[in-house]
Amino acid sequence: MDNTNDSISDRVERSLRTSRRALIVVLIGVLIAAVTLIAHALRPGSFLSDWPSKAPWLIPVAIVVFVAISALTRRGRASAAEAKNVMQTVLEDEFRQANLSRAQRFALVVVLLAQIPLAALSLSGLTTAAAVTVMAVTTVTLGMAALIVSFLIFDRD
């Protein structure tokens, strides 16, 4: 009986580690996309803004690498019923839900405070389209990054 509980708790811990790693990958992807969009708004002809058109093979290669890594980590997984039980345990964890709520509140405060300096972009001499694009991309990126990073920090053991 104890062996089964240890097995389930080990699976829950592996699931949490995988979830954290996935959040880090999502954070990196969000930051790369944001930097590319901001560079495209500020300096349209630079390499940083045009890398997707100059090296279009990077995106499919990255997708294949992530799929391959995901397939390799799926070996030795439990049955579908056990996997569902593990995910249900993770999703219903009250401590994790409280950490997500704290992270959401923190991200909201970060986004609201960021609007003050971002409003100065409209006075910076940029074109209206560039200023609005930078403001929007920065707001969304800050919100998503603050949520992910604060959740990863609050959710540590």
Image (cartoon, rainbow, N blue to C red):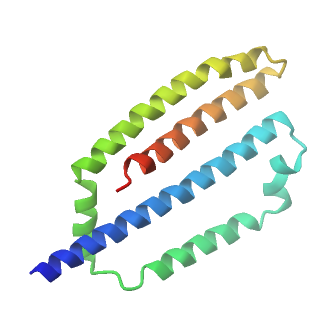
Left or right of residue 108: residue 124: right
Q: Is residue 32 above or below residue 117?
A: below
Left or right of residue 85: residue 63: right
Residue 6 found in image quarter: bottom left
Whole-percent x and y of residue 35? 72, 44
Whole-percent x and y of residue 1? 9, 81
Whole-percent x and y of residue 43? 86, 38
Left or right of residue 119: residue 51: right
Residue found at the very far front of the displayed protein: 157
Q: Residue at x 34, y 56 (%)?
A: 157
Residue found at the very far top of the displayed protein: 123
Q: Residue at x 52, y 23 (%)?
A: 112
Q: Residue at x 64, y 48 (%)?
A: 31
Residue found at the very far bottom of the displayed protein: 76
Left or right of residue 79: residue 28: right
Q: Is residue 24 above or below residue 148?
A: below
Q: How many labels does the image show?
A: 0
Whole-percent x and y of residue 117? 66, 20
Q: Could you say which is closer to the camera, residue 117 or residue 156?
A: 156
Residue found at the very far right of the displayed protein: 45
Q: In this view, does 65 lie above or below 97?
A: below
* Res. 81 in view: no
Q: Residue at x 49, y 82 (%)?
A: 72
* Res. 117 in view: yes
